[in-house]
Image: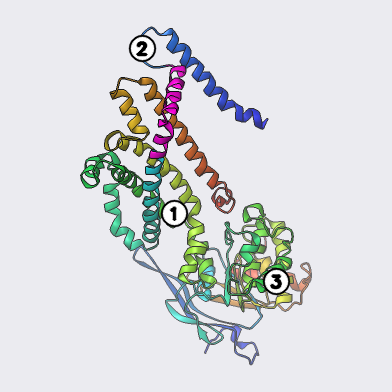
Amino acid sequence: MVQTEATIRGNNSAPKLCAEHLGVVFDRDGQALPVLEDINLDVEDSEFVCLVGPSGCGKSTLLNAMAGFLSPTSGSVRIDGEIVTGPDPRRILVFQERGVFPWLTVEGNIGFGLSKLTHAERSQRIAHYVKTVRLEGFENSYPSDLSGGMKQRLQVARALAVNPDILFLDEPFGALDSITRVIMRGELLRIWQTERRTIIFVTHDIDEAVQLADRVVVLSSRPAQIKEVLTIDMAHPRNISSPRYLELRDELLKQIGLAYEI
Amino acid sequence: MKFIERLRPVLLVAALVAIWEIAVDLHPGYILPGPIGVAGGIIDLIQHGLLLKYVVASLFRVTWGFALAAFVAIPLGLALGWYRRGEMAVSPLVQIFRPISPLAWIPIAILWFGVGDLAAIFLIFVGCFFPLLLTAMNAVHNIPAVYINAGRNFGLSPSAFVTRVLYPAVIPQLLVGLRITLGVAWLVVVAAEMISVSSGLGFLIVDARNAGNRYDLVIAGMVIIGLIGLLLDLGMRSLEQIKSFRWINSEG
């Protein structure tokens, strides 16, 4: 079976998500361009996994294939044992930018996926997630009146509101300034600890990965293969100047092939 | 401050009208009636009950031609924009029809519909149809992929996808297209009325010249056409200001 470190973790329950020999080949002007090659990865229920790798290596492609937006050329992705064939409200992808609907208010965006609920349930759910992402007072604002960080929180709220099993986040804080990014990490961890979902998080930020993830999956440059899976054995909250943190961070930098010094 | 800013264009118009009157008074020959003469012409039209009648007649034709074109061209354009293969099939045909001036259709319009409202409405329809079709097709192309993917992610049915993602996403661009096309409709109606009907502001201009060189009425007709065009444009612009419609301007 799968020979990555991921499966060697001693866990008897079936994995939440399981990528098997996943390969994606793009067609660029008639030329085959392999992007992903033989990706094997198991993700446990309510685990927080970060995907890191050099830019353009295919991290987002992998995420899109797992979320069902892209059909793999070979291999498959299974979620709860079921082969993924397309996007599904049980797993929501959060985009880097412009993911919220600008024609809807904060409430409208959070309630976007809730049209099947009764009016009362819907407004209750909206109120809950407005509070969760701390957008109280902005219920009737349009995204154009929100800051970048608030828009990303809104996107996370819209995703959480439909009660998904898995959240896929595609560099969700990549377009934010560095201070907002740090605050947003804290917010995401706080939400993850109370709402407990499986999170698969693409980032090119090493610190972000070490601060957030249970495990960090390091991808090679294109065609991407899994180079290493690093378990971050630190409890939250993590001290980012502790020796263990720095050690893991260095290990990750080494795996990606970056020097220690600039 | 706000008041002064609003006053500025009014003052400019007043100054130009004053210059116009002075220039006409100073000039010996008769090339153009002055603003006072034109105002007299407008009062004349009001007194004969013609102004309202002609304005209503023109607006009636514009409304029908424009609305019919919008109802046919927009859904068709959205569908073609979404299904690229359909668009590729139709595109050459559209590109051939589009550069033909709606006025070139006047003989055909009279042949098919006779002299009357229908011919004028048909001409406006033709003039509006292709710009609106292209606007709708382009609007679909310009929808950011994230909106489409986000819509797909939440498991919407095809009809819900159209009403809750596709339609709101194209609205800002459609409104711009509709505003420009309404201007086209207003241009076409005047030309159509000069030839194919016996009422309306276009007819007024031709009739005033033919029936006794009443150039004061010609200019009066032009002024009214301009003013109504301005009001139509302001009306469409105010639609663009609605918050859930106007996002395209505010979203980087």
**Along the horizontal axis of the image, is A70 left or right of A147?**
left
Which residue is at a point 59% across and 26% down the rendered structure image?
Answer: B8
Mark 2 packing: few (<14 Cα in 10 Å), some, or many (20+)?
A: few
Residue B177 lies left or right of residue B197; in this view the side is right
User: B48 or B12, which is in the foreground?
Assistant: B48
**Towards the viewer: B66 or B110:** B110
Residue at the disc numbered 3 = A124
Q: Quadrant of residue B211?
A: top left
Please state the horizontal and vertical placement of residue B133, each as a whole percent of the image: 37, 52
The residue closer to the viewer here, B157 or A149, is B157
As helix, strand or loop, the secondary structure at mark 3 comes to helix
Q: Residue at x 26, y 53 (%)?
A: B93
Looking at the rendered structure, whether the residues under marks 1 and 3 are on a common chain is answered as no
Kindly state the secondary structure of the residue where label 2 is placed: loop
Disc 1: which residue = B139
For disc 1, the chain is B
State the predominant SS element of the stretch in magenta.
helix
Q: Residue furthest bottom?
A: A12
> In percent of the image, x 51 and y 58: which residue is there?
B168
Q: Is residue B215 above or below residue A49?
A: above
The quadrant in which residue B57 appears is top left
The residue that disc 2 covers is: B30
Kind of residue indicated by mark 3: Gln
Q: Does B41 appear in magenta? A: yes
The boundaries of the magenta stretch are B34-57
Q: Are marks 2 and 3 on the same chain?
A: no
